[in-house]
Image (tube, rainbow, N blue to C red):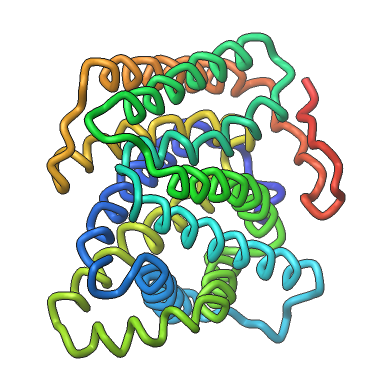
Amino acid sequence: MSAQNRPPQPALGVLLVVGSCLSLPFGAAVATMIFPELGSWGVTGLRVLIAAVVVLIIARPRLGRWNRAQWTAAILFGISIAAMNGMFYAAIDRIPLGPAVAIEFLGPLVLSAVLTRRVADAVWVGVALIGMGLLGVDGMVGAEGLDPLGVLFALIAAGFWIMYIRMSARVGAVTTGTEGLAVSLAVGAILLLPFGVPAAVTAVGDPKVLLLAAVTALLASVIPYTLELAALRRLPQRVFGILLSLEPVFATLAGFLVLGQHASGLRLAAIALVVVASVGVTAGARKRRGAGPEEEPPSFMTGSIPVVPD
């Protein structure tokens, strides 16, 4: 059965997104441990390079059969992977993990608000947005203020996250299995070679750094990208975007367990809001299972604002 004709599986899609949200922030937390040796962009380049090699070996894409639409989608997806991750890692090199994720999450929140036309979904977007705002306030009123350049990097990452969601869905629609992901990661790795090659040379000389880089690649690239690509084949993009509100929750957990970043009462209140929003949109998706699959929004390349019909 082709990706276009596969029946929607919202329950499995939700589990896949949760798995991605759990994996990504722990990978980011591990990545910060090797920033002093490799730099944030060096870690990004090495991480994407390792992930590309692993997924290419697993997928073994048959590129001779690819058409122009598949190549275009994979290249644009690769650009979004390189830019989004590079900017996010540059951000968490300057500001704490929790606030950085909260700011970056403005990207999928904006996408969800654009894609939805249901009042209930708009309410859940609003609840999640309030939670993100509280996480941002918590970062600003804490013991240390947020570095303005770090905030700017996180905002740029948010913009590329929108592109990532759109192009990930497009790649999932025009390719099968993980072929599209493999090619996209390879594109991202090529774009980041000026940073990744020097980082790889440094890492080879230090087994501990190399191990942490490999763990980062697995947790922050291979696992979440594979899960998200599969999830976007089973969930509407707007539902996928709102479900990503779980990520700041796990980012806070990862910051506490790995980096020793404690959660204040304000941050815990924000976590409660994003959990409520996630439960709400998940329940809504399950209720609509019998309504039939939603139409695929217009391609990112059209430049139009996508609207999911009722």
Q: How many marks?
A: 0
Q: Nearer the viewer, residue 159 or 186?
A: 159
Where residue 46 appears, as percent x and y from the top left, is 37, 76
Residue 47 relative to residue 261: left or right = right
Q: Nearer the viewer, residue 95 or 217?
A: 95
Where residue 115 appears, as percent x and y from the top left, is 71, 29
Residue 294: image quadrant is: top right
**Residue plotted at (53% across, 29% down):** 242
* As drawn, 250 above or below 61: above
Residue 273 relative to residue 261: left or right = right
Q: Nearer the viewer, residue 38 or 54?
A: 38
**Residue plotted at (15% across, 48% down):** 258
**Residue plotted at (29% across, 55% down):** 27
**Residue plotted at (56% across, 20% down):** 125
Where residue 75 appears, as percent x and y from the top left, is 68, 70
Q: Which part of the image, by quadrant, shows the C terminus? A: top right
Residue 18: image quadrant is: top left
Q: Which part of the image, by quadrant, shows the N terminus? A: bottom right
